[in-house]
Image: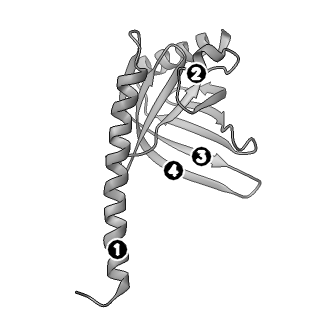
Amino acid sequence: MPDNIFFYFIIAFFLFAIGKSIYHFIEKKKILANYKQLNSIEINNISGSIVTTSGMLRQRFEWFTFDILINQNSVFLFPKSFYFIPSRAINLVYSTANNKYTKQTRKPEQIREFNVSKDNLEIVFMRDYFMSQTSKLYLKNLTQEQIKLLGSVLNKRIAD
């Protein structure tokens, strides 16, 4: 047994990372089982990034590959860190005005605005617990069919 405590921290870090990835994988399966609707649309392996600004000089960048589940009342994003390890799910709702739909979702974050361009989609949302913290989600390298699908779904839902 090594006497160096650094060795134990490395082992604990790897065990924590493995446990966290197993937890988020099981959580994704539960969300798909409980919140998937009959007319849901799934899109897999979309590259993108999340830029979170929480002040004038504080920004955080995260690069992910996403799996997306589009429901009638919300969008679930399942990011995968390092392109294979699952991370926490993000639930975006179109409007919190209708409590009937927001009660059917899990920890919702409201979509504030979105911009559709030639080959990517930008979604701006704010977290409920920090109103000064704005997150921008960039979905990149989308096909034209995926851009049309996401744009039409977001336009339709925001207008409601």
- 93 sits to left or right of 23: right
**Residue 85 seen in this snapshot:** no
Nearer the camera: disc 1 or disc 2? 2
Cα separation between marks 4 and 2:
29 Å
Mark 1 vs mark 2, CA separation in Å: 41 Å
- At numbered mark 1, what does the secondary structure look like: helix, strand or loop? helix
Identify the residue at horizontal 40%, vertical 29% (top origin).
Answer: 31
From the image, tell me which residue sits under label 2: 103
In this picture, is 160 found above or below 136? Answer: above
Question: How many angstroms separate mark 3 from mark 1 (CA)?
Answer: 29 Å
Question: Which residue corresponds to the image point at 33% horizontal and 78% vertical from the top-left?
Answer: 8
- To which residue does mark 3 refer? 51
Give the quarter of the figure containing the C terminus: top right
Residue that appears at 22% across and 86% down: 1
The three-letter code of the residue at mark 3 reads Val
* Residue holding disc 4: 62
Residue 98 rendering spot, x and y as whole percentages? 67, 14
Residues under labels 2 and 3: Cα distance? 27 Å
- Specify few, some or many for label 1: CA neighbours under 10 Å numbering under 14, 14-19, or 20 or more: few
- How was the colour assigned to the protein in this rendering? one colour
